[in-house]
Image (tube, grey):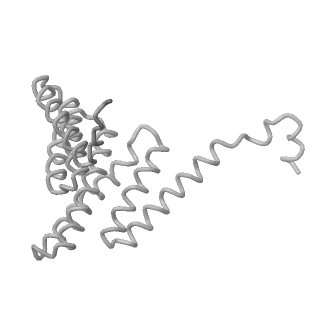
Amino acid sequence: MPIPTKAPTPDALQREALCRAAADLDQAEGSGQPYVISQALAQMARCYRGLDAAETAESYLKQALVWGRMTGSVDHTVDLLCELCEAAARVAEQHEAAEDTPGAGHAARERARDHAFEATHLAGRVADPRWEIKVLLRISDVLDRCGDRDDAVSLQTRALRLMSGDLAASLPDVATLPGMAGLADG
């Protein structure tokens, strides 16, 4: 009869993922390729985020952003900036919940806002306009968590405008539809 084994805990799975990510980072650093290094650093950050170590995650994301900028990819930079502003917002929430370091939550919120502002500025240059909408809504969520409701609503409005323009562009021109041309003149 087989001996029953315990299923690994979520924490154990996260630690295992962290070990794999660290090995991948070692390999990536050996390659010297900025995009590969940036991705490996971002994966390390995601593992630390999974372990609820927001400050460490933020630190790895900062390093990933440095390497990511070297790639020249606006999309990659925007994605990293979004992750970075989310991480900084999480750091702020953790400091405020712990009430251990006066002002630490404020400083982290300011970092989140700075990253959000830069991501918003670059969002109009991403390759896919539909992804721009998702970026704006993602940043809006972070700004709302930071207490910047007016800026969050402004970004939501911008995203809605883009959605309505995207919807209008995807609709067929009624005049070009067979049997509908007379209705368009109407």
Q: Quadrant of residue 147?
A: bottom left
Tell which residue pokes out farthest to the front in this image.
1
Q: Quadrant of residue 29?
A: top left
Establish if 149 lies above or below 181: below
Q: How many discs mark residues in the rendered view? A: 0
The residue closer to the viewer here, 60 or 116, is 60
The residue closer to the viewer here, 40 or 77, is 40
Left or right: 21 as drawn, with respect to 142: left
Residue 4 x, y percent position in the rendering? 30, 37
Residue 172 x, y percent position in the rendering? 72, 40
Establish if 148 lies above or below 182: below
User: Which residue is painted at 43% across and 61% down in the image?
Assistant: 155
**Quadrant of the frame with the N terminus:** top left
The residue closer to the viewer here, 48 or 103, is 48
Residue 74 x, y percent position in the rendering? 31, 40
User: Which residue is painted at 28% across and 50% down in the image?
Assistant: 83
Tell which residue pokes out farthest to the top in this image.
31
User: Which residue is painted at 14% across and 23% down in the image?
Assistant: 31
User: Which residue is painted at 30% across and 42% down in the image?
Assistant: 7
The residue closer to the viewer here, 58 or 148, is 58
Residue 170 x, y percent position in the rendering? 64, 42
